[in-house]
Amino acid sequence: MKVKFLILAVFAFLISCNNKTQTNNYFLDETTGIKNGGVKMITINTPKGDFKVWTKRIGNNPKIKVLLLNGGPGMSHEYFECMESFLPKEGIEFIYYDQLGTGFSDNPKDTLMWDLPRYVEEVEQVRKALNLDKSNFYLLGHSWGGILAMQYALKYQNNMKGLIISNMMASCPEYGKYSKVLAKQLPPDVLKTIQDIETKKDFSNPKYMDLLMNNFYNQHILRLPVKDWPEPVNRSFSRLNNSLYVTMQGPSELGISGKLTTWDVSKELKNIKIPTLTIGGKYDTMDPEYMKWMATQFPMGTNLTCPNGSHMSMYDDQQVYMNGLIKFLKK
């Protein structure tokens, strides 16, 4: 009995030491010079000159490094801050990144720079600067970030270990059709007022956003009363680059009319052969059934549907979203 107890005690000690080593390695900062909390400004070369984009690394894991591509287009990385409550304790390294024109990165204020192929090359430059490669590099793109992630993977998947497409369809025309399905669910008087404002192109009318926030956003963007939205979400929304958003998405919240209007890679998904996870929400602005279908088109695709989630399922169906994401990354 004493021998068995001794063996169990030694085993527990070894596990404790191993966990402590993993924790120490996760928080190990190997940078030299003045410490700045993992922030790295990266110089991006563009046809219009050089600009700097902001990144920040959380943790250290040589096998799992997740670069986060925020949505909008035009929002900042800040709404991803919920990841800090889940990924560090799992030992998963992740990297915040404000795309050019967003958040803490440079803003050239030039609509010619708001272009999908250019953003693809920007992500590749960021990857190289952060020393990410096919042994550890996961790309998570949410919403517009999902478009960017898919387009990047079609060109650079040989540099990747895995792909996560969060709350984004592979076809903007199909997304446009689904937005009309959701619009019809609005109260008739609300829908008519919104459509009247859009017809007049009076998008700066405060009534327009008020109606959307309290009748559409709180149902399909983040399923909480607007007054209860998490602070990181509100902070990210407050930094929205409207020029970037309108150029790519268009001014209407109930459809798409910008540069991305005809974007469609649904027939090319079969060419993305790395492990891929699609995440959708039952109440999402993106068709959850389409998200399930997308997963079947990737040779190594899987799907996660958040039954209580909307477009920001990482908040309104948090446990399902995070547990599924962590399972995929560790698998």
Image: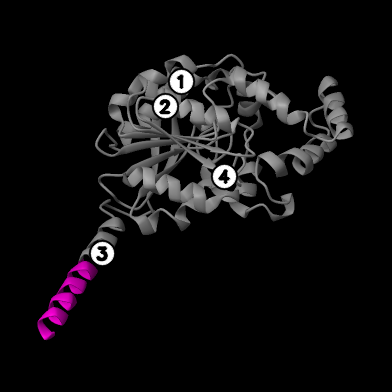
Disc 1 versus disc 3: nearer the observer: 3
Local SS, label 2: helix
> Which disc is residue 19 wearing?
3
Mark earlier in primary sequence (2, 4): 2
Q: Which residue is mark 4?
A: 313
**Rounded to the nearest whole Å, what is the CA distance between mark 4 and mark 3?**
30 Å
Which residue is depicted at the point 32% across and 37% down?
A: 137
What distance separates the C-alpha of mark 3 from that of mark 2? 37 Å
Of labels 1 and 4, the one closer to you: 4
Q: Secondary structure at mark 3?
A: helix
Q: Residue at x 50, y 31 (%)?
A: 292
Q: What segment carries the magenta color?
A: 1-17
The numbered disc on residue 118 is 1
Residue 14's disc is none
Q: Mark 2 or 4, which is nearer the eye?
A: 4
> Quick one: label 3 or label 2, which is nearer the N terminus?
3
Task: Please name the predominant secondary structure of the magenta segment in the image.
Answer: helix
Amino acid under disc 3:
Asn
Q: Which amino acid does the dot numbered 1 rest on?
A: Arg
In the image, taking residue 270 as reference, residue 176 lies left or right, namely: right
Residue at point 50% right, 47% down?
Answer: 321
- Residue 242 x, y percent position in the rendering: 66, 31
Q: Are marks 2 and 4 in contact (CB under 8 Å)?
A: no
CA neighbours of label 4 inside 10 A, class few (<14), some (14 to 19), many (20+): many
